[in-house]
Image: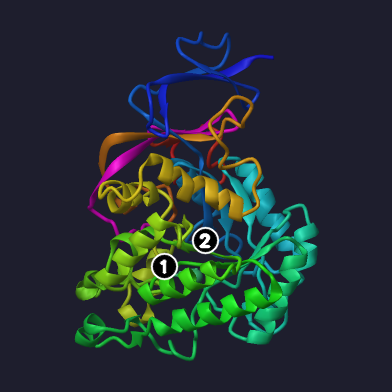
Amino acid sequence: MTADLLIRGARPYGEGGPVDLLVRDGVVAEIGQGLAGPESGETLDADGLVLLPGLVDLHTHLREPGGEESETVATGSAAAALGGYTAVFAMPNTDPVADSAVVVEHVHRLGEEVGLVDVHPVGAVSVGLAGERMAELGTMAASRARVRMFSDDGRCVHDPVLMRRALEYASSLDAVIAQHAEDHRLTAGAQAHEGVVAAQLGLAGWPATAEETIVARDCALAREAGARLHVCHVSSVHTVAVLRAAKAAGVRVSAEVTPHHLLLTDAALTGYDPVHKVNPPLRTGDDTAAMRAALAEGVIDVVATDHAPHATQYKDTEWAAAKPGMLGLQTALSVVVRAMVEPGLLDWRGVARVMAERPAELGGLTDQGRPIAVGEPATFCLVDPDGIWTVRGAALASRSANTPFEGMRLPATMAATVLRGRITARNGVVAPMDAARDGKVVA
Ligand code: DOR
Ligand code: ZN
């Protein structure tokens, strides 16, 4: 057996002294000090870098098939690798919708061809995301894509009868239903968080109760079915209270928060720049504070990006016409450092938990989010905790540029990402096998 990689002088979880890791055949073969470099293969100088398990994103919009003007599997995978991710869950609101074995297998295969991150397709709950008939969850689960998460994200599974059946059926497949919790009757025409800012700007309000009530209903349905429910992009302080009570009562519910709901508030909307339009909307400082506390406490389990690329024509328009959504993959870690690590709410061990270990567990991945130990897959990211960078949408690997963090100076830079012993990104550049399918990504 040949060694493929030596990582020299990294600090696992930012704890203890620096160690070397020798990687052979994609697996950690030795951890120690002063290890000899590989006869063949590469050495990664990780002096001063924090070593974490590769990040896992439960909520990514890759847009392919059908939305290639905004993102492709290739450009989205490049953004993911550069952001420290080694696996992403691709949401099904594509065109055609990923509601059949054919489409999920197609997306899965595209992910394999690009090879920068493991792409796990999320299957739709309802045919065409129409919220009426249940999609064939079983055939998607049995397909080559082995789907274990189903969601109508972008839309809420509104019909309680459909939601109840989907939970029961998913349970028999050992799968989870990820709900975009929004009572569409309460948010009809909504453009921004219902509150003072929306009133001042003359934008129709999206009441937080539209999220809270669906989460309460779904927790009851999940309890009754003994099924697993995952709540996408929690945004309201009131939803946290519902989750806390449900978890205390033993309901099998998990939840995610996005980086933007940890850091940004509706105060950002005053310039009417649609880059800040997102669903659920940016809310108040009380809400961001509640998101941070709930994530630190574990009431919210994970950070998920809701990476939602939109081409210029969908964003450079008046507020009401603009599509909701913002980029997330390349900025997530830095935003989590700003919102959680700097204020002392999470340490690096905690970051590994909410961005890698727990997402892998919830997504049913057995080879991601693993401990940093001999015999485990060499699937990592290496963070420079002292790095500082300025976000420029045009410089991101995504095919779109709709970042709400434009011009911000953020802490922590991603030095390298390693997937099963192979470097997929290093110092802001994706591996040479990148992006065969798109010219924007520079090797
Ligand atoms: O802002 C959002 N954008 N929220 C969603 O739920 C869907 C997403 C998208 O697909 O653009
Ligand atoms: Zn959503």
Left or right for 132, reference 352? right
Q: Hey, which quadrant is residue 287 in on the image?
A: bottom left
Q: Residue at x 44, y 90 (%)?
A: 186
Residue at which label 1 appears: 325
Q: Is residue 354 above or below residue 66?
A: above
Magenta residues span 400-427
Q: Residue at x 31, y 73 (%)?
A: 283
Q: Label 2: how many residues lie within 10 Å, few (<14), some (14-19) or many (20+)?
A: many
Contact flag, marks 2 and 1 (Cβ < 8 Å): yes
Q: Label 1: how many residues lie within 10 Å, few (<14), some (14-19) or many (20+)?
A: many
Ligand 1 within 8 Å of disc 1? The answer is yes
Q: Is residue 337 above or below residue 35?
A: below
Ligand 1 within 8 Å of disc 2? The answer is yes
Tell me the kind of residue under disc 1: Gly
Q: Hey, which quadrant is residue 318 in on the image?
A: bottom left
Tell me the kind of residue under disc 2: His
Q: Residue at x 33, y 86 (%)?
A: 205
Mark 2 lies on a secondary structure that is loop
Residue at which label 2 appears: 61
Left or right for 61, reference 316? right
